[in-house]
Image: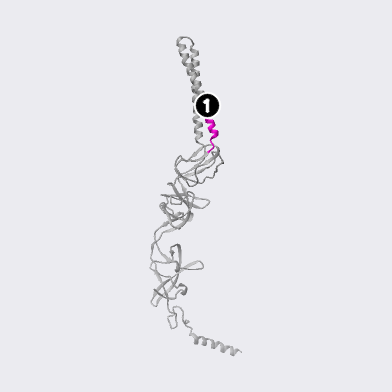
């Protein structure tokens, strides 16, 4: 049994030597001998830096620099609303009517008091004039004239007081019709006809379209890159840029709740279809420096790491070399390359599923 086992041990290495002689298996990549795989046809692109906007997208809120909150100055029942949300109004245009009947009755009552005080003053004036003539004739004493003068002054004062009260009540009557303090766009109107309003009730807002700002909250990790003058692009629902404006304000402090920094961009003009307090997509462009880009089709991913193949040419031809890369944003059909590649390298963009690291390739 032991002699049989020993013979087997001696014969096994001879069999291995006969099969391959310990050399490389036929067809191995880069073998170059008889039976090696032919080079794989691949297409390549030459990397070259080009200006690409480095940007990030955020959600912006459109706010007005000139936004007026409309509240009534009197209390009462709403009888009529003259406008609706989104209407453009001019300064002084009526917005809402509050029932003025009670105040109108007060004005009427005060005007009747004025007529009575005017009659009192006319009588006091006649009495004063009559006593002045009688005093000159020696028919009355000077004390009686002084009494008439005092009565005349009291009548004048009472008439002036009534006239002042009438002016006040008439001004109050005007407050029952709420008007726009300035030209602008009417906001949401939460009150309805028949509601009771007080001076604490918010009726609506009037926003002037020429004073709009985009408010953007930028995460703290990118706060160090912020600077005035960076370009902000507002993106419409169709993906097109509807406004381009520079950053005009950067908050000196971070927001505790969101751990972000407030950035503002003043809008030179109001884009079509944009309203105050609307949320819109905003693209903050950090720079336009030349950077390397690589086609998306050239990138593969393994265990969370991105790789590309580059064609390296040597004495024996071209071979594919797999390189790990760090990528940035997608711009069109390309990734922005942060690390891993250099300008001038030949990146393979076809048949990457048929090649491996060190495999012979034939670039075209």
The front one of 93 and 20 is 93
Image quadrant where one finds the C terminus: bottom left
On whether residue 99 falls in the magenta region, the answer is: yes
Q: Residue at x 40, y 69 (%)?
A: 45
Where is residue 106 shown, x and y percent of the image? Answer: 54, 31
The front one of 16 and 341 is 341
Crowding around mark 1 (Cα neighbors within 10 Å: few <14, some 14 to 19, many 20+) is few
Name which quarter of the figure residue 345 lies in.
Answer: bottom left
Pointer 1 residue: 112
Where is residue 363 shown, x and y percent of the image? Answer: 40, 74
* In the rendered image, the vertical position of residue 251 relative to residue 351, given as above or below: above
Name which quarter of the figure residue 347 lies in.
Answer: bottom left
The front one of 291 and 77 is 77
Q: Residue at x 45, y 9 (%)?
A: 137
Where is residue 350 shown, x and y percent of the image? Answer: 43, 72
Image quadrant where one finds the N terminus: bottom right
Q: What's the magenta region?
A: 98-112
Residue occupying the far right of the picture: 1
What element does badge 1 sit on?
helix
Where is residue 123 shown, x and y percent of the image? Answer: 50, 19
* In the rendered image, the vertical position of residue 210 relative to residue 50, given as above or below: above
Main SS, magenta region, reads helix
* In the rendered image, the vertical position of residue 20 relative to residue 122, given as above or below: below
């Amino acid at each position: 049994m032991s002699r049989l086992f020993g013979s087997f041990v001696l014969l096994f290495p001879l069999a291995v030597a006969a099969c391959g002689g310990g050399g490389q298996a036929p067809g191995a990549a880069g073998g170059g001998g008889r039976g090696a795989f032919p080079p794989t046809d691949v297409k390549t692109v030459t990397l070259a830096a080009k200006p690409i906007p480095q940007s990030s997208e955020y959600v912006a809120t459109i706010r007005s620099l000139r936004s007026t909150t409309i509240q009534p100055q009197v209390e009462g029942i709403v009888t009529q609303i003259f406008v609706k949300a989104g209407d453009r109004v001019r300064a002084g245009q009526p917005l809402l009517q509050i029932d003025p009947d009670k105040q109108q009755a007060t004005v009427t009552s005060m005007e009747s008091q004025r007529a009575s005080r005017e009659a009192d003053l006319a009588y006091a004036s006649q009495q004063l004039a009559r006593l002045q003539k009688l005093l000159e004739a020696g028919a009355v004493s000077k004390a009686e004239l002084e009494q008439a003068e005092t009565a005349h002054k009291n009548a004048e004062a009472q008439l002036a007081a009534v006239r002042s009260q009438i002016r006040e009540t008439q001004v109050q009557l005007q407050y029952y019709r709420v008007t726009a303090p300035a030209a602008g766009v009417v906001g949401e109107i939460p009150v309805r006809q028949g509601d009771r309003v007080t001076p604490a009730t918010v009726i609506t807002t009037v926003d002037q379209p020429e004073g709009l700002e985009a408010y953007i909250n930028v995460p703290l990790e990118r706060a160090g890159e912020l600077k005035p003058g960076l370009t902000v692009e507002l993106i419409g629902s169709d993906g097109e840029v509807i406004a381009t404006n520079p950053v005009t304000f950067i908050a000196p402090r971070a927001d505790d709740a969101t751990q972000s920094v407030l950035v503002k961009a003043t809008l030179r003009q109001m884009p079509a279809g944009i309203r105050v307090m609307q949320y819109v997509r905003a693209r903050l462009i950090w720079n336009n420096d030349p950077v390397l880009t690589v086609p998306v089709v050239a990138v593969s991913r393994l265990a969370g790491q991105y790789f590309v193949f580059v064609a390296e040419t040597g004495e024996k031809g071209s071979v594919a070399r797999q390189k790990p890369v760090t990528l940035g944003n997608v711009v069109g059909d390309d990734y922005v390359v942060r690390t891993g590649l250099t300008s001038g390298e030949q990146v393979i963009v076809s048949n990457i599923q048929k090649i491996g690291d060190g495999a012979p390739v034939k670039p075209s």
